[in-house]
Image: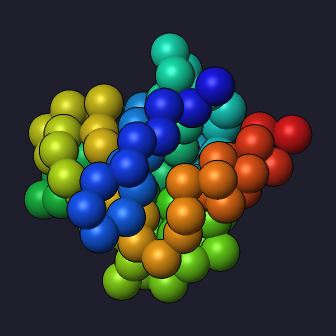
């Protein structure tokens, strides 16, 4: 189960990054975090931008609704997702994991 917590302004999702992958997309779950693969390298914040874009696309929200809160230089990150209630976000995450 993906860790989702409510915070002022939206919900926080735990993400495990896989930069430099062969293809971008949702790669499953890793220790309670959504594993997201991106082709961008982990330099100059390019992977973080690509992760935010991939997460927004997968959840069906605009890129501006997804913001990196913590984990800029590590693989374990926390993203704030605005505009979705916790129940709806959890439902969409469950749908991604099939």
Drawn side of residue 9 relative to residue 51, left or right: left
Residue 36 position in % (x across, y down)? 53, 43
Q: In the figure, 3 relative to 82: above or below?
A: above
Please state, as top left, top right, bottom left or bottom right, where the C terminus lies in the image: top right
Residue drawn at the location 19% of the way across and 53% of the way down? 69
Drawn side of residue 62 relative to residue 25, left or right: left
Drawn side of residue 67 relative to residue 13, left or right: left
Residue 74: image quadrant is top left
Residue 61 position in % (x across, y down)? 56, 78
Instruction: Give the total of numbered labels.
Output: 0
Residue drawn at the location 53% of the way across and 44% of the way down? 37
Residue 89: image quadrant is bottom right
Q: Is residue 47 visible?
A: no
Residue that lies at the very extreme toward the right in this rendered image: 98
Q: How is the image coloured?
A: rainbow
Residue 84 position in % (x across, y down)? 54, 69
**Towards the viewer: 38 or 51:** 51
Drawn side of residue 30 relative to residue 73, left or right: right
Residue that lies at the very extreme toward the top in this rendered image: 31
Please state, as top left, top right, bottom left or bottom right, where the N terminus lies in the image: top right
Residue drawn at the location 65% of the way across and 37% of the way down? 27
Residue drawn at the location 57% of the way across and 32% of the way down? 2
**Towards the viewer: 54 or 8:** 8
Residue 17 position in % (x across, y down)? 40, 38
Q: Is residue 69 visible?
A: yes
**Towards the viewer: 19 or 73:** 73
Q: In the figure, 75 relative to 66: above or below?
A: above
């Amino acid at each position: 189960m993906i860790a989702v917590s409510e915070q002022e302004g939206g919900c926080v999702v735990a993400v495990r990054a896989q930069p430099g992958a062969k293809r971008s997309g949702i790669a499953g779950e890793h220790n309670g975090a959504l594993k997201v693969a991106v082709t961008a390298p982990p330099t100059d914040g390019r992977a973080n931008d690509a992760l935010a874009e991939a997460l927004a696309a997968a959840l069906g929200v605009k890129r501006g609704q997804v913001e990196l809160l913590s984990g800029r230089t590590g693989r374990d990150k926390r993203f704030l997702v605005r505009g979705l209630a916790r129940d709806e976000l959890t439902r969409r995450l469950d749908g991604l994991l099939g």
